[in-house]
Image (cartoon, rainbow, N blue to C red):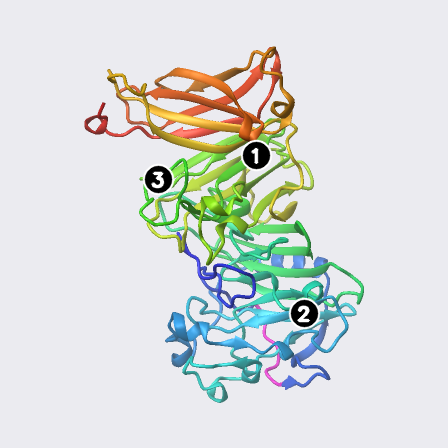
Amino acid sequence: MRRRTFLGAAGAGGAIAGSGFAGVATTLAAAADRADGPQALVGEAQPFDYAWLKGAASNLASRPYEPHGRPLPPDVAALDWDQYQAIRFKPDHALWNDKALQFRVSLFHLGLYYKRPVRMFEVAGGQARQLAYDPGMFDYGKSGLNGARQPRDLGFAGFRLHSRRDGFKSDVAAFLGASYFRAVGREGQYGLSARGLAVDTALGREEEFPDFTDFYFEQPDPHSSTLVVHALLDSPSVAGAYRMAITPGEPLVMDVDAALYPRKRIERLGIAPCTSMYLAGENDRRMANDWRPEIHDSDGLAMNSGSGEWIWRPLTNPVNLSFNSFADRDPKGFGLLQRDRDFDHYQDDGVFYDKRPSLWVEPKADWGEGAVSLVQIPTVDETLDNIVAFWSPAQKLEPGKEALFGYRLYWGSRPPVQSTLATCVATRTGVGGVVGKKRAHYAWRFAVDFAGGPLATLDWRTAKVEPRISLSSGRAEIVSARPLAALKGARVMFDVVPSEALDPITIRLYLKTGQRSLSETWLYEWTPPALDARKV
C-alpha cells in the first residue's frame, strides 16, 4: 500500500509517495556550466534518441542489478512532512523559463520519502545534457535546511510539468516516487496515479517497485502542444526504456511506448498500472465513519474487452485483500474511473473528490492473451492508495529478450470512448427482505441504477425489460427492474441469499429486451458475513 502525499488542485505543492528514486548507471563530470538561461547544465553533451535509450536499458539488464544512489545528507534525510512541504521550487529557475515554448519543467527536492536522486536531462538538437542541482533553485522557507551547505551534486527527486495554456500557473503532470506519475484534466485536479510498471503485486510477499532513474526532456518546437519525455527504468527484475508524448487538454493524453528487458522471469507483471484510493462510497460503507458521504478517487474499474463487451466493476474497501483477474484477449481498453461527479455526493470542499480525473488505458496494438487484474487492499485512511489495476500478459517475458508495449493514457472527466449501451451510474447495498414483513432468512439487497443509451428513449409500456442476473453461488430473489425517470434510465433491485459458504460471491447483471442488450455488464464481488453475523 502506498501513502499518497498530494491532494487537491494541481500545483498545490505536495508530492507523490513511492519507494524512492534510483540514481544512474553512468556518471557525468561534476563541474556545472552556467547556461544562458536560468537552468545550469553539467557535463558534455551526448547524442540521444529513443533507440539509444533502449540500448542503454538492454545493456543495463544484461548486468546484475545494483542499488542506485547514495545516502542523503543527514539534514535532508531527517526532513519531516511539514519541513519537506516548506521547500518550494523557484519558478524563474524552471527549464525553458527563458524560452518562448509551450512548456516549462520545475523540479522536486530530495527528502522525506524520496531518498535517491533522479537524473534530469535536456535534449536539444539530438544532444543531451544533464540538469545541475543548485540550492539557489529552491526557497527553503521553514524547512530548516541551509541550502549553502548542500552538496552541489545532490540531485533531484522528480519533476512537474507546466503549460502555457494557463500561464504556467499550475501543473499538468508530475513524476515523483519510484515510477509513479499523475496528470490532470480540464478541472485541474490531481487524483489517481499511473506508474511505469508493476512487479509481483499482491503475491503475499513484498512487492517490487521499479524506479525511473533518468528523465530526458526533448526541447519542443515553440508552437508544439506536445512534450516528449523519455525515462530509463530499473529494478532487480527488469530494466526498461519509455517514451511518453504528453499533450495537455481534456482529456490530457500520454502516448506511451515501453521497451522492457527482464533480468529474470517475473511471476506477475503489470503493464500500464493504475493506482487509486477507495475508502467509502454508496455501495461500501464499511469505513463510512467520516462526516463526508463518500471518499474515493475512483469508484469503479471499466473494461472494454476484446470481444467488445463493456464491463463495470464498482470498487470496494474489502475486509481482506482482494485480487481478481478478468481474462481477455486483445483488450480495447480499461481504466479506473470517477464516474460520480456530483459534489453533493462527497461534500468535500477541500480536496474535491467530485473533480478527480479518471484514467483510461488504450492499447495501440494487440496485446494477445492475458487479464486485466484488480487489487483491492483494506484501508482505514484516505491518504493510502489501496486500489491497483493493470494488464497482466499470459506469456511470461523471457530474460534477455525485448518486450514492446504501446498504449495511450487519457486523464480527464470521461474516457475518450463510450459505450452506446446504458451505463451503471450508482450501486447501493443494504439489508434485504420486504419492508413490513418478518424476514425468514438473511439476504443482502442490491440496487443498481443504469442510465443513458437505449434506456433514455425506451418505451416501457411496450418493451419488456429483463434483468439477467447470474451468481457464482447462492441465489437471487425479489428481482425487479423499473424505469427511473430522474435518470432517464432504470433501477434494478434484487436480494442475494448466500449459502453457508463464506467465499466471495461474483454477481453479474445486465439488462435486455428480447435479444437486444440494453446495458453494459455490471460485475460485483460480495463477501457474505460470518454465519453468526447474519441477523434477520
For mark 2, does the 10 Å Cα neighbourhood hold few (<14), some (14 to 19), or many (20 or more) residues?
A: many
Q: Which mark, residue 285?
A: 3
Residue at screen point 44% across, 50% down? 347
Q: Which residue is mark 2?
A: 104
Up/down of 206 relative to 71, above or below:
above
Q: Position of residue 199 (x, y in %)?
A: 48, 48
Q: Is residue 433 among what the camera can see?
A: yes
Specify the quadrant of the image occupied by residue 302: top right
Which residue is identified by label 1? 303
Which element is circle 1 on?
strand
Q: Position of residue 57 (x, y in %)?
A: 61, 58
Q: Nearer the viewer, residue 225 or 480?
A: 480
- Closer to the observer: label 3 or label 2? 3
Which tag, 1 or 3, sits closer to the chain's start? 3
SS majority, magenta: loop
Q: Is residue 352 left or right of residue 260?
A: left
Start-end of magenta stretch: 25-31
Considering the image in quadrants, where does the C terminus appear? Answer: top left
**Tag 3: amino acid:** Arg
